[in-house]
Structures are given as C-alpha cells and as structure tokens.
Image (spheres, rainbow, N blue to C red):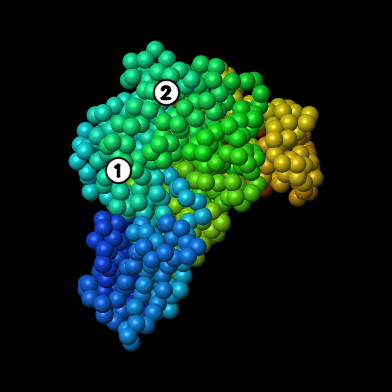
Amino acid sequence: MALLAATPTAAVAEDGYELWLRYRSVEAPWRARYAPHATAIVTRSASPTMRAAQAELRRGIVGMLGAEPSNQLQSGAIILRSRVRIGGLGKDAYRIRSAVVSGKPLTIIAANSDIGILYGSFAFLRLLQTRQPIDRLDLSSRPKLPLRLLNHWDNLDGTIERGYAGHSLWNWAELPQIHPRLIDYARANASIGINGVVLNNVNANAQILTPAYLRKVAAIADAWRPYGIRVYLSARFSAPIEIGGLGTADPLDPRVQKWWRGKVDEIYQLIPDFGGFLVKANSEGQPGPQTYRRTHADGANMLADALAPHRGMLFWRAFVYGGSDDDRVKQAFDQFRPLDGQFRRNVVLQVKNGPLDFQPREPVHPLFGQMPRTRLAMEVQITTEYLGQSTHLAYLGTMWSEALCSAAAPDSLLAMAGVANTGNDRNWTGSHFDQASWFAFGRLGWDPTAEPRAIAEEWTRMTWGNNPRLVRPIVAMMMRSREAVVDYMTPLGLAHQMGTDHHYGPAPWVCDLPQPSWNPCYYSRADAQGIGFDRTRSGSNAVAQYTLDVARRFADLNSVPDEYLLWFHHVPWAYRMRSGRTLWDELVIRYDRGVSDVESMNRVWASLAPMIDAQRHADTAARLKQQLAEARWWRNASIAYWQSLSKLPLPAGHKPPPHTLGWYQALRFETVPGFLSPRIPPGWPCLSAQGDLPCAP
Ligand code: GCW
C-alpha cells in the first residue's frame, strides 16, 4: 500500500475515452491473487458474440494482469459455456462459478445464450476492476427488465437535441462504413446490459425511413448484433405523407396501414432483428393520430400491427400536453389512463419518470402502477438538460432510483429508456462525471432495485481507481451531487425555473411566453403572499391522480415531504415548516446549502489531485469551478426575484445577492447549446466563470 501511495496512477495520461473499461494494471498483491485464475480463455463456439466475449476478456486480462491468456484447458482457465439451460434464468442471464475439474481450478462462465456469456464476461472483469476476490465464485445474475434502451435525440444533420457532448456519433456521410468508435460504443453498452438503441430524435425526420438511410442503419445493426444491441428508429407519424406520397397519415385509412406494413417489411428485409419504432405523437408540434380525430391507441396499434409479424415493438411516448388548459402535469395521465387495456401486446407506453419534464426533482409519474393492462417503460433523461447541462456534476443514479422505488414502479415496468448523453467528444459525455449516469442507467435497467451508492462506487473504482482515499470522497460527492443541484436551482418542490428555450440558468421571473406552461411563473405561482402550486382539491387536484394513500400523503400539509411541498401546495412566505423555520427562511437556507455543497465538492476535488491523472483532474476541476459560479448565480438570481415579491429580509448570516434583480434579468445566453448559431449582439452582459462579474467585451 505504501508503494501504491508513492507511485500514484496519476502518471498515466488519460482522456476518458475508455470510459469504465480502462483495464489498468492491478497492484502486485492483487495480480498475485488473480493471475492463477485467468491463465486461459476456452470456448468451443466461434459465434461473433462469443468472439466478442473472448476478445473483451483477453483485453481485460492483458491490461490488468499483463499476461497473454492461452486457449488451452489448463489450471486457471476461464471456460465460456453457452446454451447450458440454466434453470430459472432467462436469455440474458449468466452464472459464474469456480470449480475444480481433474485437479485443475477453473472458472466457468455459463449462460443460456451467447449474449449471457458476454454479459457474464463483463461481470467477471468488473470483479477484477473493483478488486473483488475471484477464487471462490458462485454468482448468477439476470436482468429484471427485458428491454434496456438508449434513446438518442440525434438529428440527421449531426446535431443533437439537448446534447452537450459534441455532435452525433452516427456519421451518415461515412456510413455504411463503420467507424471503430461505434464498436467501442457497443462494448460500453453491452458492459452495462443495454440491449437496444433508438438512433434518431423523437422529433423525427421521416427521411430516416428512406432506403438510402435504411441501408446505413442496417450497417449499424450488423455491427452491433454481436453485442446484443438491437437498433430501433423514431418514426414520424406523418411519414406516409412526407415520403410515401399519400395525402393522409390517418391510422384507420387502409392506404396508410398498407404503406406502414410495406415500410416495416422493407426494414426487416434489411435488418431481420430490427427492434421497432419509438413515436412522439401530438406533442410539441409533432404529428399524430389526433390530427385525424383518432386516439393515441389507434395510432399506436396501427404501427404495432405492422411490426407484430416480425416481433417488433412499438414504443409510444406519453409525454403530451397543450391540448387543454388544465394543469400541465395532469395531462398525460388524463389522456392515457382511460386507454389502459386498449393497446396491442407489442405496444410499450413510454412514460417520463415524473409528470412534468425531467426536472431536478419531481414526484413519480402517476401512470406508474395505474396502467395494469398496459406495458410501460420508464423514460429518464441521462443528458442533463435541466440539471446544469454538462457543466454541473449531478450523478443521476439517486434520482432514478427515487422514481423506481416509488409507487410500485418496478413491478409494472417492461423497459427503461434513457435519453443518451453521448456525443463525439473524446470522452463521450463532455464531462467525465456524466459517464457515471450512463453507467448507472444501464445498471438500474438491469436491476431497478440496485443501490445507487453501490453503482457509484463500482463506477468510481472502474473509472478513477481503487484507492479508498479516493473512492470514499468521490462516492460521497456523487451521492450528494443531485440534491445540491435541487437545492440551488429548485428547492422544496419548485420546478421549471430555467431560462427560456435553452433551459440554461435561472429565469423565475419569466411570465410572457405564449404557451402558459412554458413559463416559470406558471409553476411557482409566486406572489406577494406566498409561493407554490396548489395541486390539492382547492387547486388543480393533480394529487387525486395518485393512488389513495399516496394522494392523501401528498395532499396533507402535515404529511407531504418537504421535497414536494411547493409542488403540491401554495403556502404563505411565513408558513411554519417542520424545522420550525418559516418557509422563506428555509428556502434561503436550501439555496445556500446547495452552494456550499458545491464549494465543498471543489475542495474535495482539489485535494484528490495527487491521486488522479492530470487531464481528467483539470477538466473536472474547471467544470466544478464553473458550476460554483453558476450555483451562486442560481441562488442569487432566484433569491433576488423571490425577495422582490416577499419583501422579507434574509435570515441572519445569509448574504444578500450582490446585484439587483434587473442585473440578473438582463443576462442573455444565446450561444448555449440549443441555438444553432451564436446570436449575442455585442455589448450584452453575460456571466463569467469568475462569478458574478460581467464577461469581458
Ligand atoms: O424536455 C423537453 C425538451 C425537448 C424534447 C422534449 C421531449 C425532444 O426540452 O427538447 O424534445 O422534452 O421529451 O419530447
């Protein structure tokens, strides 16, 4: 250990490309323990998936133990045994077991299918990567959810909606030639059990369904097949008009049905294991069945019928609002709950984790647990549109686990869908720490009951190193990180206080957008008397959408958790909280707590410098510094605005914002991602990384 401390791994240059599959050399005592159990890799099958498993094991063993494994059945061999019919385990499951055969210690990775072997191989490597013993193994694992999908919001022009890590990984000009990076992408996904990828944005372009694109899509499907990843596409509901030459997309029109059947047959000719379609319909301007006075079920079932003969799935999103003046968070439930039981077997209703829109904190979506005759997917956003984009360190395992644990969600789930945070940045996700949420998404899709802390620790060990002096503080930082964002952006159940359109930075004062529910003021309902959205019976009664016991808990001021107070209740500024403080004081304290958490993250990270490679350390340090400036900005701008309404003094010891409200309101951010071209007129004030100082002209 002394030796380890004296020669830190910091010497090795790293850029984050390898993600959590770094396979760096293990410390000598561990090598002595591992090497006798990794002398050879033996398999009889040469299927592409088995070859991928073998190649990964070899890569890991050479990297970590520095010795080339043979392919001989010898002492210390790893035997890959597929199609063994392991009772009780499904297709993707694996079993890893130590055995002694004819006096030779062996490790057997067994599975019902080749893909189970690949998953088992990654699991075996993970044991070494996280410094677990491997000499007396007997473990098995199977995914609790059969479908674990990434959703890419990639546009055909290479841009990514809400993407903060560069351009799309799919280079349509270069395809069908496969860039090696696409294989590394598949390895990363297979290592965490992801088994489906939707390639294109749900705000879909029908061109993806034309033969020229489909041939390129087929090349991707071929490349990923060995890794167990099926390709899916977002389908634009009006494609029969745009690329089919029809005058309608009415789902009950036989010509439309025939066109989709033909299109689906054409896709399966090229991609026999095509996963299916994902559809955003009648939402935010996207076309859909309601255009023809048909229901969401009519639309979904028509597409599902075209896919069914090929065993394809149809994911239909429940993210709809705008069709009524009612509270926005009620609208998806009101539209979809009555359709329970009306969807075909191969339809999956894809529901966001919360009823609004990927906020730092929302209560769970009330559709979970209340669509007993419909298969559901929980959609989460890995890309952090509303949590500081790729600057703020926010580990999302804790957030998703919160949703998965609530309202019996896991029992009613067939799938998890995660809006991907990858792009062509060298380290895939822009921020190194954003890799953790990609990792956690896969691990929670495999087991929604997994502990977010255990996942964070696993990722930390694989990504940064196993030294406990580094693991402990990093995990602690990750576990607190999302709550810190909640505190300095939208504490106590506030939501959607972000800047218009790009959703970057605070804008609680905005109240003039044409669609009422796009306005932050719609959600805060703040005025001189108080703050919060009354969703009890005296207000929108959204609370009644929950099951009786949950509804009661949320509706009652005595039992609603502080975290959801202003989501469900409008209360006076002087409202007395459980802490004994007034709401106003508590609010200010929460903002400050969030900021001080980020201060401490900065300190902790700085102290880890000697144990972390220079490039990744510096990159993360720079982002944390920016995060601190932005956390202060969120705190100051929000407090300045609320104070202009409440007229109350700040509690003792809490500093007033350094600028006037008008100063914060005048900031413009027209070069942040979301805009295609910089549109900052010269002379606009903006925020510098140094804090509340205007940028240099
Ligand atoms: O959160 C919102 C985003 C949109 C996105 C939409 C959706 C793809 O701001 O950019 O559109 O959600 O989920 O459909």
The amino acid marked with disc number 1 is Ala
Q: What element does badge 1 sit on?
A: helix
Q: Quadrant of residue 8?
A: bottom left
Of badges 1 and 2, the one in the foreground is: 2
Category of crowding for the residue at label 1, using alpha-carbon neighbours closer than 10 angstroms: few (below 14), some (14–19), many (at least 20)? many
- Which residue is disc 2 drawn over? 257
Category of crowding for the residue at label 2, using alpha-carbon neighbours closer than 10 angstroms: few (below 14), some (14–19), many (at least 20)? some
Would you say 279 lies left or right of 213 here?
right
Please say if 537 is above or below 131.
above
Q: What element does badge 2 sit on?
A: helix
Q: Position of residue 589 (x, y in %)?
A: 66, 46
Please name the residue shown 40% across and 77% down the image.
98
Would you say 221 lies left or right of 645 here?
left
Question: Which residue is farthest top?
Answer: 247
Which sits in the foreground, 40 or 486? 40
Please name the residue shown 24% across and 29% down the image.
212
- Which residue is disc 1 drawn over? 221
Please name the residue shown 72% across and 44% down the image.
550
Q: Quadrant of residue 270?
A: top left
Q: Are marks 1 and 2 in contact (CB under 8 Å)?
A: no
Quadrant location of the C terminus in the rendered image: top left
Q: Position of residue 585 (x, y in %)?
A: 71, 43
Q: Answer yes or no: is residue 158 visible.
A: no
